[in-house]
Amino acid sequence: MDSAGQADINLNSPNKGQLPDFMIDVPVGPGVAAQTPAVEQGLTEAEEEELRTELAKVEEEIITLRQVLSAKERHCGELKRRLGLSALGELKQNLSKSWHDVQVSNAYVKTSEKLGEWNEKVTQSDLYKKTQETLSQAGQKTSAALSTMGSAISRKLGDMRAHPFSHSFRITPLAGLGNPWESERGTGGCCPSGII
């Protein structure tokens, strides 16, 4: 609302739809104004009639403006539809523009510069270099240990497979009548033969 006490008609305003302070206690409705005695407000009958006429004109203007706004919104929607613009496309465009605005803002630029300076100082420090070297060595040793362990497990499994005793535990999925728990010996049951 402006200082003159008139309603803010800016549709993007956070005060949109709010009444001026002097209108908050004014009763609203077609029959309400007739019920409020003009004598209590210190108005003459002529002043009251003039105010009622002005009120009726303002209410008519409000209705007309709402109709015009509705027609403009429909026309805008039709134009966007014909141009192939969608709400999602507009949202993407708005977000992209907003992100660009943030990136070129002084605060973002200064923060980026400061973070770049800190990054440079940190990566050039002896502590960072030692930590990086230690972590690199630890990664190499862990990789070598896991590789050695994997090779040992593979070798053990190969040895077990080559041992004649392991054949009694082997499961053949399609042996017999398709029972996956039936062993090579064909005994069937809930477990491979030789386990129980």
Image: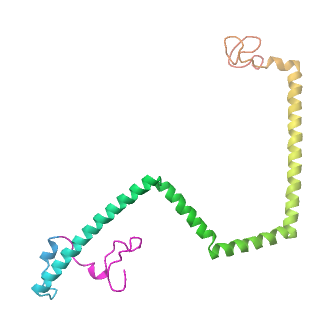
- How many marks the image carries: the answer is 0
Residue drawn at the location 16% of the way across and 76% of the way down: 33
Look at the image and give the residue range highlighted in magenta: 1-29
Q: Is residue 135 left or right of residue 89?
A: right
Q: In which quarter of the image is residue 113?
A: bottom right
Q: Which of 115 and 86 is in front in this view?
A: 86
Q: Is the magenta region chiefly helix, strand or loop? A: loop
Q: Position of residue 148 (x, y in %)?
A: 89, 40
- Is 126 situated above or below 180? below
Q: In this view, does 15 lie to the left or right of 48?
A: right
Residue drawn at the location 59% of the way across and 69% of the way down: 101
Q: In which quarter of the image is residue 7?
A: bottom left
As for residue 96 lying within the magenta part, the answer is no
Q: Position of residue 98 (x, y in %)?
A: 56, 66
> From this viewpoint, is residue 39 visible?
no
Q: In this view, does 141 lie to the left or right of 27?
A: right
